[in-house]
Amino acid sequence: MPIAIRYYLCATHVLERLAPIIPPLALRLILAWEFGEAGYQKLIGDNWFADLTFPFPFNLLPSDISWGMATFFELAGAMALVLGLATRFFTLSLMILTVVAITSVHWPEHWDTFGELLKGYRIIDEDGDGFGNYKLPLIYLVMFLPLLFGGAGKSSLDYMLRKKFII
């Protein structure tokens, strides 16, 4: 067997052994940073939720309760993601929070065509044209999918607890 193929197979083997460790950890840490930062800004900032229209059933809650829930789930979820504890629960919670944020803040005010909808696929709404800015929260949703379906990975408390208590 040629040496290049042997090196390739060896490198592939190493990458496959690291796959359940490195990628979930990297996703957990970057998402924890983003949501922890957002939660901290809510913790020290003023409640601006009163001016928003939330989707059902979140529109039934007073804005102060919504603000507190968002702050709690962003901060607690960030800490849980760092530790890899209750990862699927907090992943789903933060995904729901993100969908509510998209519908309440980031989604276009109006759109009639798919082309107009795609104008909102951007990071910021610089010109305030009403087409929204849902690109970043959509990226977060996609980043959460491996954690939701695959779990926190081997570098997590979830993995250690499962290994200890489940046969």
Image (tube, rainbow, N blue to C red):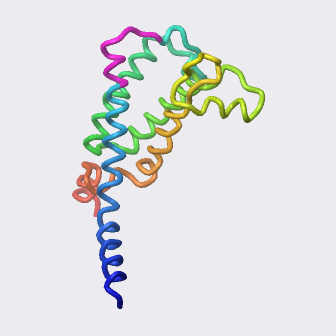
* Residue 112 vertical position relative to residue 59 in the rendered view, above or below: below
Q: Residue at x 24, y 48 (%)?
A: 157
* Residue 40 vertical position relative to residue 33 in the rendered view, above or below: above
Horizontal side of 55 relative to 164 (left or right) equals right
Q: Position of residue 129 (x, y in %)?
A: 64, 18
Q: Quadrant of residue 12?
A: bottom left
Q: Position of residue 143 (x, y in %)?
A: 45, 44
Give whichever of 163, 44 is nearer the camera: 44
Give whichever of 25, 163 is nearer the camera: 25
Quadrant containing the N terminus in the rendered view: bottom left
Residue found at the very far right of the displayed protein: 112
What type of secondary structure mainly makes up the magenta span? helix
Q: Residue at x 30, y 13 (%)?
A: 44
Q: Quadrant of residue 89?
A: top left
Is-magenta flag for residue 43? yes
Q: Residue at x 25, y 42 (%)?
A: 83
Q: Position of residue 57 (x, y in %)?
A: 57, 23
* Residue 59 vertical position relative to residue 156 in the rendered view, above or below: above
Quadrant containing the C terminus in the rendered view: bottom left
Q: Residue at x 66, y 34 (%)?
A: 118
Is-magenta flag for residue 165? no
First to last magenta residue range: 38-48
